[in-house]
Image: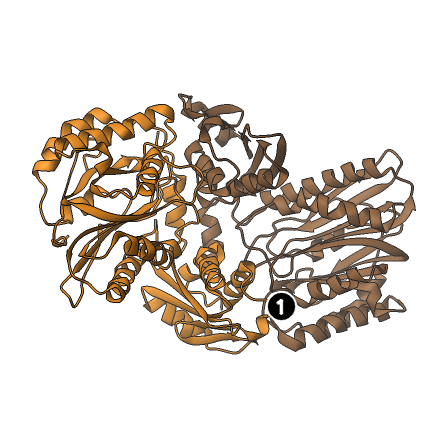
Chain colours: A orange, B brown
Amino acid sequence: MSPMKLPVGFQASGLSSGIKESGKSDLGVIYSPYPLYWAFTSTENTLKAPCVSRNRSRFISLQSVQAVLVNSGNANCANGEQGIWDNEDMAGYAANVLSLKRVQDVLTASTGVVGKKMPIDKVKASLNKLARQMTEDSTSFSEAILTTDSQAKQVALTLDSGARIVGIAKGSGMIHPNMATMLAFVMTDAALPQETLREIWPKVVNNSFNQVTVDGDTSPNDMAILLSSHQVRANPTDFTNALLEVCAKLAQKIARDGEGATKLLTVKVTGARNELEAKNAARAVVRSPLVKAAVHGNDPNWGRILVAVGNSGAVSDMANLTIKLQSYVVYQGQSLTFDEVAVSGAMKAASEVVVEIELAAGSATATAWGCDLTAEYVRVNADYTT
Amino acid sequence: MSPMKLPVGFQASGLSSGIKESGKSDLGVIYSPYPLYWAFTSTENTLKAPCVSRNRSRFISLQSVQAVLVNSGNANCANGEQGIWDNEDMAGYAANVLSLKRVQDVLTASTGVVGKKMPIDKVKASLNKLARQMTEDSTSFSEAILTTDSQAKQVALTLDSGARIVGIAKGSGMIHPNMATMLAFVMTDAALPQETLREIWPKVVNNSFNQVTVDGDTSPNDMAILLSSHQVRANPTDFTNALLEVCAKLAQKIARDGEGATKLLTVKVTGARNELEAKNAARAVVRSPLVKAAVHGNDPNWGRILVAVGNSGAVSDMANLTIKLQSYVVYQGQSLTFDEVAVSGAMKAASEVVVEIELAAGSATATAWGCDLTAEYVRVNADYTT
């Protein structure tokens, strides 16, 4: 992992606290001496881990924060009252070590095993070291938040004004005994009002992280946090575009790194009646196990794509639809003759399979990202490892 | 396949017409000399094959029918105008051969490859023989409607009054180059008014066929038809119960025969606030790839079940939930200690894994059926076979 310098006003670190039996890095912190403006989105699952519920309450208060403590290896979810207290303790210990006045200045995030008590003593024992090791480089933090990800995921971008955005995420691969989680932390020094950030963030998340599907399950720990130290001037439009670019790239990294995945599947829908239908159609295709399996087999199976679009409800007349696979037209209103061997070859040769669907019903567009479905996915997730 | 006698007033047959290159049986007919009362449900996919659209129009007319012509091997879907004419021709030829006065007396159903022209001449050339071979046994018909099913699916039941119900279905396994289809034809001689049948049928379908998930995709050709020759007296309540039993058994056969499946997964939800939420919760669990993979690995992974229920929106507080796996309590409000090896062993030993979920939020219940997710599913569906 190459180093990546954080935006002005941020420090971070990560280390192994012993939560993971493997001894891999599992505890990370983001800190700023400035009161950070922030925006937040989280899982739609009605079951929510204590860290998600706590951050949501913090979010409503409109108050700034100064740190985020993240652990991997234990989701601290479905642990009853004990889980709520352990989560609160994590924030409290971190506030203490970082000399913050209020426990509320610390957000928390946990990912990993569900239903296992958080080893809070291990976290506590490691916090001093974690704080001492903080630097202006994001690498050790990006490694501390991983679970089944095969690699850390970081994207950085600099605006013309000099303001920077650094995004760090972990993916939604799944492993015994539980679901994993999508976590994203995006830091910026762009000086924009908190209300602007909070207006932009859900839109950007909807067009990036929320358009990723690995297996259709949503974890009770999913969250995406935008943090700003507001130290460098920035134009709101430039910032929004750059933020979307960072998050879309992170989303693609997550999709490509889905468990057992060998290919990125990108689905671009155009000509929808409205944005919601465009999004639903794109997501329906990347989510379909049949489409995902066909992508794995380099099978230009437009029938499955058509059916998935039909299931999304975004189109009522298949006579207007056009489907392209790796730029080849494979369906236009009805089946047509195309060079199946050539299309299959183009799918096989690429590490990204691109499906383009023109609905010809309006002008709304959306893109979604996923991955192929492989026997390896089944093996990883069927494995019983007591 | 053991013979199964049809209800009074029904004849059926099936043969190989050459639609399938394998030479397997691919054309079947159900016929009655009586005007049949009927009820009908079909796919929610907004893309609909011509056979589905035509039957829907017929259904609205309230008129009786006398025959159903079914082919497998070609879905006659996404074939544009040509597909609509070919479907109409199939009905017309069948009406002619069966000496029916009206083309409208024939319903049609097609399942198989999408986007390939129906070989209508082969169908036409086989219809005389098909009509000549009609008998009061359902076996040859039940074999003619199969695609990737590993075996024919028939269930029969006799009411106390002597009225009979015979149900025949094909499953929702999927294969290159396309999706397959759930088809169900249930025949009865119970003498009940058509309006009663039409009131009962969607409820029964909602509690049986619509609670089956193999991979979450819905075919544009799915349909379920109830046909009655109204020749034998029957009590409406007895009939409804028996009909549900027949359809639930067919649904289980379909789930158990999902592609690559090695186990039936049965999910029973109790204590839901309402029936819709109960159904959604049960379906969310049988649909989750993570749960399905865990079932394949005999992994008592209650965390994935919990998350799937959470995704369904049927519960807002995980503190009230109880989850049983093969009758063992594995979650009750929070994680608890249970004998993982014993539960895993109980899963491994059985051909059916039963998940029971008590939501403790109301009194509504629902059951859904699915199957495990196996590497074989991926292999079958990734295979490119030009």
Q: Quadrant of residue B129?
A: bottom right
Q: Residues within 10 Å of mark 1 (few under 14, many from 20)?
A: many
Please indicate whether residue A150 sits to the left or right of residue B190 in the image.
Answer: left
The image quadrant of residue A135 is top left
Q: Position of residue B52 (x, y in %)?
A: 69, 63
In the rendered image, the vertical position of residue B298 relative to residue B334, given as above or below = below
**Callout 1, which amino acid?**
Cys
Q: Is residue B255 above or below residue A117?
A: below
Task: Report the front residue among B9 and B332.
Answer: B332
**Residue at 28% across, 27% down:** A86
Q: Which residue sits at x=24%, y=35%?
A: A104
Mark 1 residue element: loop
Q: Nearer the viewer, residue B53 or B89?
A: B53
Q: Is residue B310 above or below residue B199?
A: above
Q: Residue at x 84, y 64 (%)?
A: B105
In terms of depth relative to the viewer, which is nearer, A195 or A202? A195
Position of B104 compared to B299: left or right?
A: right
- The image position of residue B111, as x and y in percent, is 65, 61
> Residue B304's x, y, as percent?
43, 37
Counting from the top left corner in percent of width and height, residue B204 is at 72, 43
Position of B66 with respect to A217 (left or right) is right
- The answer to whether one can see residue B250 in this image is yes
Q: Which residue is mark 1?
A: B77
